[in-house]
Amino acid sequence: MAFATRRKTIWKNIAFFLAILGPGIITGSVDNDAGGITTYSVAGAIYGYKLLWTLIPSFIVLVIIQEMNARMGIVTGKGLADLIRENAGVKVTFFIFIGLLLADIGNTTTEFAGVAGSMEVFSISKYISVPIVAFMVWFLVVKGNYKITERIFLIFSVSLLMYVVSALMGNPDWKAIGLSIVRPQMDFNEKSMEVIIGIIGTTIAPWMQFYMQSSVIEKGLKIRQYKYTLIDIIVGCTATVVVAFFIIVACASTLHVKGITINEAKDAAMALEPLAGALSSHVFAFGLFIASVFSATILPLATAFYVCEAFGFEAGIDKKWKEAPEFFILYTGIIILGAFIIMIPNAPLIAITLWSQIINGILLPVVLVCMILLVNNRKIMGEYVNKPITNLIGWSTVVILVGLSATLILLPIFKRIL
């Protein structure tokens, strides 16, 4: 009888977890977008296995930050943008969110560049692939509902694990991989600083803080379900780092050992063919396609969510167009603009990607400071404020990010002086 009761409890807990599954895994998986795959590919191609160790602190920080977002969303029932407006005022909110909007338009353009590049590996023109994907992602959100959309997102998340296959085809040196993790090393120069900041920046992006909190609210989660939400977050963050790990390994074990340099993820997919075979190349390209479609859906969605929250407009996938016109107009506009830029011949995609990442890097510490201050406010969070260890990691992350960014800015100046 006791065994039957225990088994029933276990199945009940599993059912609860499956019911709330989604926000953590989806938010984590979108980190591995076209920009992220490019960053990891370049890191592996240039530095081999040397920077794999950066994924460990990135994982810890990612879990801590997403946990704070989820806890704030569950306790307050309000999005991060809403809380920032209420506590920092409209002027501060306006400047933060104009910057985020510009960055996310650039990020969305990068995702459509990933769609175009990945399909070119299969000899499909961007003038065919980009409009079709743009319409698909628009239709999914505008005409779908939250439950169906979330299930499709979860399938996309699982599909990213195909990078494990691509990496294994490159016959990686597992001993060298182990040594690179237990004996961290880095080159103290401008290029390595750029790559390290890129790895951290693509793992912890400003937009994801807003999307995570909004998706928790959209799902209607309560504090009694917190422990299941935490599991969802940990699973999502683990999947994120595992995918990043195998992308770096795939490029390190093939491109780096042959001295092949790349500028974008499409270059990595094409360069893999003569080194690891056509299947490895196609798996890598298809992974880029899935990630780009996934992120081209989520990024405009996250942007529409937090901009509407910040300025008091209705927002939500389950709402009809007439109930939340600003939300759907903004979502539609970002998709059209991002797709249109990619269709322009000789569009400056590298410059767009670079500047969107620079804006992200500048805004990330600002967003994190706002988050940490809000989650420690007892008037907002009551007994669910941060524990000291969470604050230590949160503030340390802000200091390290500012320090890395300052180093990247100051290194060229010191070079000229010396």
Image (cartoon, rainbow, N blue to C red):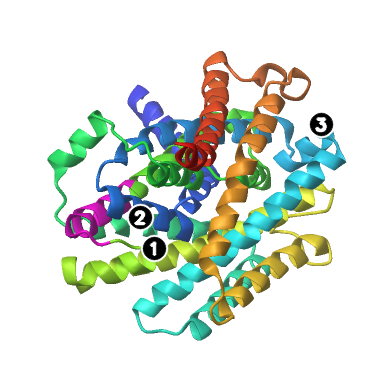
Label at residue 42: 2
- Label 2 near label 1: C-beta < 8 Å? yes
Q: Earlier in the sequence, mark 3 or mark 1?
A: 3
Residue 23 picture location, percent across and down: 55, 46
Amino acid carrying label 3: it is Asn
Find residue 217 and report its image quarter: top right
Instruction: Give the residue type at disc 2.
Output: Val
Q: Closest to the observer: 315 or 178?
A: 178
Q: Point out the stretch of residues depicted in magenta.
A: 245-260
Q: Nearer the viewer, residue 259 or 118?
A: 259
Disc 2 and disc 3 in contact, CB within 8 angstroms: no
The answer to whether residue 147 is seen in the rendering is: no
Instruction: Give how far apart the Cα atoms at labels 1 and 2 are.
Output: 7 Å
What is the spatial separation of the Cα atoms under label 2 and label 3, in whole angstroms?
40 Å
* Residue 154 at x, y percent in the picture: 47, 55
Residue at numbered disc 1: 263
